[in-house]
Each structure stands twice: as C-alpha cells, then as structure tokens.
Amino acid sequence: MKISSPAKSTTLSTARISTLISWEDAPRDPVEVFYEVPLAFADALTADANAFLVAAIFPAMAAGERRIVVDDVVCPRLLVGLHTVIRLFDHWYGKGKTTLVLEPKRLLDQASDRPPRAGSFFTGGIDSLATLRVNRLFFPEGHPEFIRDLVVLYGINFDSDDSPETFAEAVTQLNSLAQSAGATLIPMTTNVRRVLNPDIEFFRFRYHGALLAAAAHALSGRVSAMSIGSTHDFPNLMAWGSHPLLDPHLASWDMRIYHDCLELSRFEKTKLVAEWEPGLQNIKVCVTNWPGKNCGICEKCMRTMLALIAVRSLERCHAFQVRTLDARRVGTIQIHTNNQSASTRS
C-alpha cells in the first residue's frame, strides 16, 4: 500500500484534507480518502500523514498488504505504537505473526509548539455522555484537559440512516447540548470506512477505534488530546475495535488518545448521565432513529430504559418515543456476560 503526501483544500463552505491510497498486493483500484469540516474549523484541520496511516493500517493488514509506504512525515511515537498494535491483533485474532512493514518517507524530529487543548468524540450515546460528564466533574475549566471540543464524525456509521439531512439535524441537536456544557461541536465527514473496508464486523471488532483516532490526528491543528468513550468496563473487556490496549497506541507526540471511563459499567455510566439533566434529556442510543427521540422499542433503547428505571429516572427522561416496556420484548434482550451471549427470558 502507498499513501501519498496529504493535501489541504477549501471551498466556500468546507475545508478538506485528502490523500491517494494505492494498493500494491490487493487487486483494488486506488482511492482518494478525505476528512472534511466546515470552513469555520479550517485551522483545526491539518494535512497530517499520521491520520491516513492510522486509518489505513488495519484495512492493509486485512487485505494482505506486505507494506505501507507513506510519502510524508510520520511521528516515531505513532510508528512504535503501530508496531505494538500489530502484535496485539496477532494475539487477538490468531493468524500468526504479521509481517507488515511501515515505511515513512521521514520521521518527525520536532514537535509542534501549539498550546494543549482537549477534545472528545461525541454521539449523544451513554458512553460519550459519560465521558463528558466525568470530565466536567473532575477537571476545572482552566485545566488543559478540560474538554473544549466535541467531535461528531459522519461517514463511519452508515449501516442505518446515512442521509446528510439526518446528520445535519443531529448536529443541530448535539450542538445545543455542547453549548450547555461549555464546549464547541465540530462536525466532521470522512469516506475512510466506505472506501477502505466497509464490512460491519471488521468495523466493530477491529476498526472503529482506529477510525476515531485517525480523525483526531486530522484535527491536530486545534486539539492535542482526544478521548474515546469506552464500550466495555474492566470485567467485560474483550477483543474489540476500541480497547485500552489499542487506542493509546494510536497516538503521536502531538495527539494523545485516551480510552476513557472503562472503570465504569454501562449501568454506572447511565446513572451518571441520569444525574445530569441536559444529558438525560439528550440521550441518543437508537441507531434507527437518530436524531430525534429514541424509538423505545429496539434492543438498545430497552437496555437503556431498563437502566433508567433502575435509577428511577425514566419518568423524567423525554428522550424516548415509547416509555413503557413490554415484558415479551424485554425477554428477547441478549445479555452479554464475561464476553458470552445468552438469551434472557422473563
């Protein structure tokens, strides 16, 4: 695989960084890969080869590429981290020792002098809401890791409603919550998953953390540290696309990546959000009805509603279209315990 030197361009309304990725061993055509933000955030976007290397490494491994040649500067901290995650994936997925070689044109030999600024990825889901809430409870506003930017990324969750109109409405709703928390919402669009590896199981188990980390590197003109809300807590850690052994190794000297809140169970996160009124009223867990109110019928909605009942908060929450739980539907929920799935019946 070859990654060309990234370029930055602007239109009247957007700023974009892009590169050409060519396959050497896989029988695939070259593709242009991009990250795009509204023009107001043009200064945040950096033509950073680190972003495209992070985005490409796991698809390259899956496609059997023998090397990745990067025609630009790569941070040596990232390079060391990527060698670590290659070994981690070998351990997790048992396909033997990967021989992928990383060949940057040059290694970064001087760090930037930009002031520190913290951000977090944000969807309105329980994980990202909990990350923001914990940050607000522990970090004073003057601290460099007080989260000032919330990034909502369009183009990686296209398995449900993927219309631009839906994303625009989501940005409007999430922006209101961001403002109430004293943060700035940054909408970002990418085609990375579509053109490099759109498979849903690959996305879940190997790729979504890297997609987020790559977007963080693309914003390194503004942000120096990004938090990714954990999916699992300590007792339920498993091989997964975002993991405490994975995400921090996708960092560079100029961009730290945090895997956040894995000390909290899903229930504890929900309780924390329920105690924060703006968060409670803006929960968005329903992938089939995002934005807008959650359907209250799908499994993700029912799981969250059950937790809210347990903390006596569902009656105060107006984020669900349906707030009554049918025992038969609840009985179909799949309970995951110690990385195993079991069907519960009631």
Image (spheres, rainbow, N blue to C red):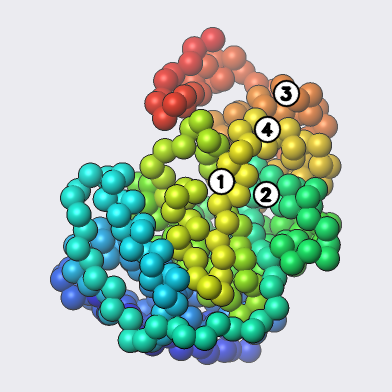
Tag in front: 2 or 3: 2
Q: Foreground: 52 or 72?
A: 72
Report the front residue among 161 and 2: 2
Q: Categorize mark 2 by other alpha carbons within 10 Å: few (<14), some (14-19), many (20+).
A: many
Q: Is residue 107 above or below residue 27?
A: below
Q: CA separation, marks 2 and 1?
A: 9 Å
- List x then y, in percent, for residue 276: 81, 42
Choose mark 3 or mark 1, whichever is in front. 1
The kind of residue on which mark 4 rests is Glu
Residue type, numbered disc 2:
Thr
Q: Marks 2 and 3, Cα distance to the nearest angstrom?
A: 22 Å
Q: Earlier in the sequence, mark 4 or mark 3?
A: 4
Amino acid type, callout 1: Ser
Estimate the spatial distance between the alpha carbons at disc 4 and disc 3, rounded to whole Å.
Answer: 13 Å
How far across and down, in percent of the image, does residue 273 sit? Answer: 74, 40
Task: Please state which amino acid type lies under the numbered disc 3.
Answer: Ile
Q: Quadrant of the N terminus?
A: bottom left
Q: Residue at x 65, y 30 (%)?
A: 267
Q: Quadrant of residue 221?
A: bottom right
Label 4 to label 2, Cα distance in Å? 12 Å
Res 286 seen here: no
Residue of label 4: 268
Q: Name the residue tied to disc 2.
A: 131
